[in-house]
Amino acid sequence: MVKEVSVRQLRNETAAVVAAVQQGQRVVLTANRKPVADIVPHVMRESPWRPASVLRNLVHDAPADPGLLADLEDVRGALIE
């Protein structure tokens, strides 16, 4: 369930709103009864970047299919519709 909180309520009850968000509740901030922002729990995202050594290990452990170059040669110059 989404909780609606006015700007005035947020100002007066900041700790309670933050506590609700920390517990996983989504909050819609309103101004003049109109939604203006969503306050949502933070989601820790893992960076997609990896060190070059990790990539080297992946390529070493699982090399490309030996027939890949032959397959690419077959489709080179083919029209893509």
Image (cartoon, rainbow, N blue to C red):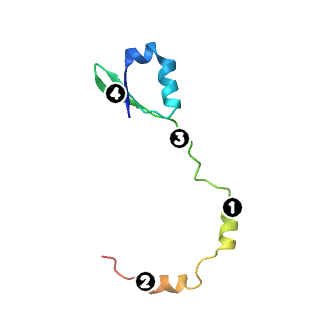
Nearer the N terminus, badge 4 or badge 1? Answer: 4
Determine which residue is flagged by label 4.
Answer: 36
Q: Secondary structure at mark 1?
A: helix
Number of the front mark, 2 or 4: 4
Residue 31 picture quarter: top left
Determine which residue is flagged by label 2.
Answer: 75
Task: Identify whether 42 is placed above or below 35.
Answer: below
Number of the front mark, 1 or 2: 1
Nearer the N terminus, badge 2 or badge 4? Answer: 4
Residues at marks 3 and 4, CA–CA distance in whole angstroms: 21 Å
Residues at marks 2 and 3, CA–CA distance in whole angstroms: 43 Å
Q: Position of residue 76 (x, y in %)?
A: 43, 82
Task: Identify whether 68 is placed above or below 9.
Answer: below
Q: Secondary structure at mark 3?
A: loop
Check the picture and name the quadrant holding the N terminus. top left
Q: Secondary structure at mark 2?
A: helix
Residues at marks 1 and 2, CA–CA distance in whole angstroms: 31 Å
Q: Residues within 10 Å of mark 1 (few under 14, many from 20)?
A: few
Q: Which mark is residue 54?
A: 1
Residue 61 picture quarter: bottom right
Q: Residue at x 52, y 36 (%)?
A: 42
Check the picture and name the quadrant holding the C terminus. bottom left
Nearer the N terminus, badge 1 or badge 2? Answer: 1
Q: Residues within 10 Å of mark 4 (few under 14, many from 20)?
A: few
Q: Position of residue 21 (x, y in %)?
A: 49, 30
Determine which residue is flagged by label 3.
Answer: 43
Q: Are marks 1 and 3 in contact (CB under 8 Å)?
A: no
